[in-house]
DNA sequence: TTTAGTGCAAAGGCTTTGCACACCG
DNA sequence: CGGTGTGCAAAGCCTTTGCACTAAA
């Protein structure tokens, strides 16, 4: 459950092609299903994805799905979203743009945001740590409007 | 390998006490080892911690170590650090203060930084997403001074 | 004495691997 | 055809669970 993303089956297949991977039946099935999940804004665990695809083609191998997901994460089609409890799921991510996630601790809804660390802050961090920064991830945890009522809690890693 | 943190064995044991947990031999062993790791700035995988402690006391159960680590993470003595490849390790974290991590993609060195998202930014995110934020994690990936030379690369989740 | 804590070994979830066969280009 | 891609089933890794026993308070 999260923000919908528009992407076509073909765009995903193209990604495979661009990387030099063949256009095969399993990859077509996967691309198609991912496009659907993207439209509905749903995230998924790789194994779940496999299980659901298997109903469509009982032959489909689990490893094939894991391998495809890896490729797509590697090439920015999918995001790995890590929840406050340390578990992770994947979601089709918005077009190219760099973004981060706001995650509901109760219902696990994921919302993409474009806000980001400022270049100045990053530069300051590079200076003070003597690192060359290559990337970063920011996950914000909280409660979505729908889950605001709910009582239990257990925030993520940070305080603030 | 990371920034050293000063904490005593006793302080860790106190944490157990404060939470209403007993002062037992296994917990003493664990606390002592963690204080050492903290001083040396080393992070660890729970299972590794168990293996090393087991040499000291072959009786020590794996589950005991996992349970202790959970408690300490829960109470802010340990941080779970997630690397760019999705794996995670733990480290003793600095005193109380909210902080984030800069992680070397090559050698996995971890440096704590105090810089953080600004309250204004957080407020803006709450407004735009209609979430109530409860916490967040920020991991910055890059290359430390020592690893700057090295050629290979594969940044984390974000671009920027 | 009472109940939390522990060790053990088994089970669990998720993911990867190895290999013979299938099939894309 | 040639080599990538695949299905399958087994193994791996890390972690949790269940339970009888041990030891704190």
Image (cartoon, coloured by chain):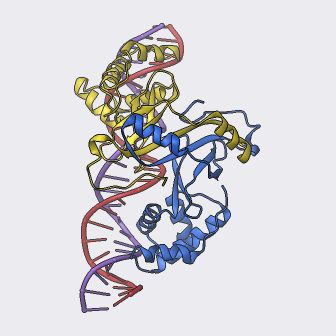
Chain colours: A blue, B yellow, C red, D purple
Q: Give how far across and how far down residue A26 sits, in percent.
A: 47, 76
Q: Is residue B129 above or below residue B59?
A: below
Q: How many marks?
A: 0
Q: Give how far across and how far down residue B39 sits, in percent.
A: 32, 22
Task: Identify which residue, D1 or B159, lies in the foreground.
Answer: B159
Q: Give how far across and how far down residue B144 sits, in percent.
A: 33, 41
Task: Identify which residue, B120 or B152, lies in the foreground.
Answer: B120
Q: In this view, does A47 lie above or below B32?
A: below
The residue at the point 36 percent across, 35 percent down is B46
Task: Identify which residue, A105 or A97, lies in the foreground.
Answer: A97
- A73 left or right, relative to B133: left
Task: Identify which residue, A91 or A134, lies in the foreground.
Answer: A134
**Which quadrant holds residue A53?**
bottom right
**Which quadrant holds residue B14?**
top left
The residue at the point 62 percent across, 48 percent down is A115
Q: Give how far across and how far down residue B146 sits, in percent.
A: 27, 41
Q: Is residue A57 visible in this depiction of the protein?
A: no
The residue at the point 66 percent across, 66 percent down is A39
Q: Is residue B24 above or below residue C12?
A: above
Q: Is residue A23 visible in this depiction of the protein?
A: yes
């Amino acid at each position: 459950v999260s923000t919908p993303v528009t992407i076509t089956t073909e765009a995903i297949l193209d990604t495979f092609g661009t990387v030099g991977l063949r256009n095969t039946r399993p990859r077509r099935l996967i691309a198609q299903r991912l496009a659907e999940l993207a439209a509905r804004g749903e995230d998924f665990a790789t194994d779940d994805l496999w299980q659901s695809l298997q109903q469509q083609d009982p032959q489909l191998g689990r490893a094939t799905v894991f391998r495809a997901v890896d490729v797509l994460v590697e090439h920015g089609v999918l995001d790995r979203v890590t929840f406050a409890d340390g578990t992770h799921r994947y979601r089709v991510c918005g077009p190219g743009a760099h973004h981060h996630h706001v995650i509901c601790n109760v219902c696990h809804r994921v919302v993409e945001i474009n806000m980001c660390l400022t270049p100045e802050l990053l530069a300051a961090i590079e200076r003070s740590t003597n690192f060359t920064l290559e990337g970063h991830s920011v996950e914000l945890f909280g409660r979505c409007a729908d889950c605001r009522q709910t009582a239990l809690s257990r925030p993520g890693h940070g305080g603030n």
